[in-house]
Amino acid sequence: MGDIIVALLIGLAGGFAGGMLGIGGGAIYVPAMVILLDENQHLAQGASLAAIISTAIVGTLTHLRNRNVNVPVVAQVAPVAVLTGFGAGFIAEQLDAAVLQRIFGVVMVYLAVNTIWGALQHGAPTTTGRIG
């Protein structure tokens, strides 16, 4: 029963991060499943990608409705992303879980530092008075 509650909380946190920040939740799902549910890296990444599908659909529909999607850009990016995803998934499957976990950790640290650095360089964004 404890793992079910933890899994529900992971889904809650990942869904919130995906909807609020547009990160898909993977930055939450994968480390949480590895650390809190003791899943191996391959299973955590696969489960994360499967869970992200529903979050991505809801987020995409919301952003389409609000006209926050540049459809021509998506049409250019998506085919390459899909093909690259197949290739990267194949490579990930060939790697030892510990190596994959280290690569994931390095990427997460890089993204965190880059995000913090960018926010410090550009300052807080100004609002236009619109909320939501």
Image (cartoon, helix red, strand yellow):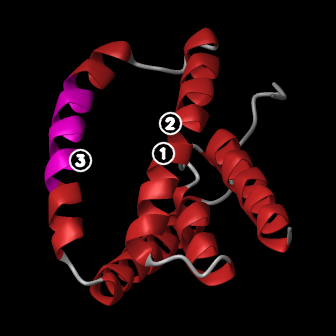
Q: Quadrant of residue 13?
A: bottom right
Mark 1 → mark 3, Cα distance in angstroms: 13 Å
**Label at residue 50:** 1
**One can see residue 62 in this view:** yes
- Please give the residue where the numbered disc 3 appears in the rendered image: 85
Q: Amino acid at mark 1?
A: Ala
81 in magenta: yes
**One can see residue 125 in this view:** no
Residue at image x 44%, y 66%?
A: 43
Question: Looking at the image, is 79 positioned above or below residue 38?
Answer: above
> Residues at badges 3 and 2 in contact (C-beta under 8 Å)?
no
Task: Tell me the SS state at disc 2.
Answer: helix
Mark 3 → mark 2, Cα distance in angstroms: 14 Å
- Please give the residue where the numbered disc 2 appears in the rendered image: 53
> Residues at badges 1 and 2 in contact (C-beta under 8 Å)?
yes
Q: Find residue 5 and report its horizontal and vertical position in percent.
A: 84, 63
Q: Find residue 27 and report its horizontal and vertical position in percent.
A: 54, 63
| Stretch of the chain drawn in magenta | 76-87
Q: Find residue 72 and report its horizontal and vertical position in percent.
A: 29, 15
Residue at image x 70%, y 43%?
A: 20
Q: Residues within 10 Å of mark 3 (few under 14, many from 20)?
A: few
Pick the residue in front: 125 or 112.
Answer: 112
Task: Tell me the SS state at disc 1.
Answer: helix
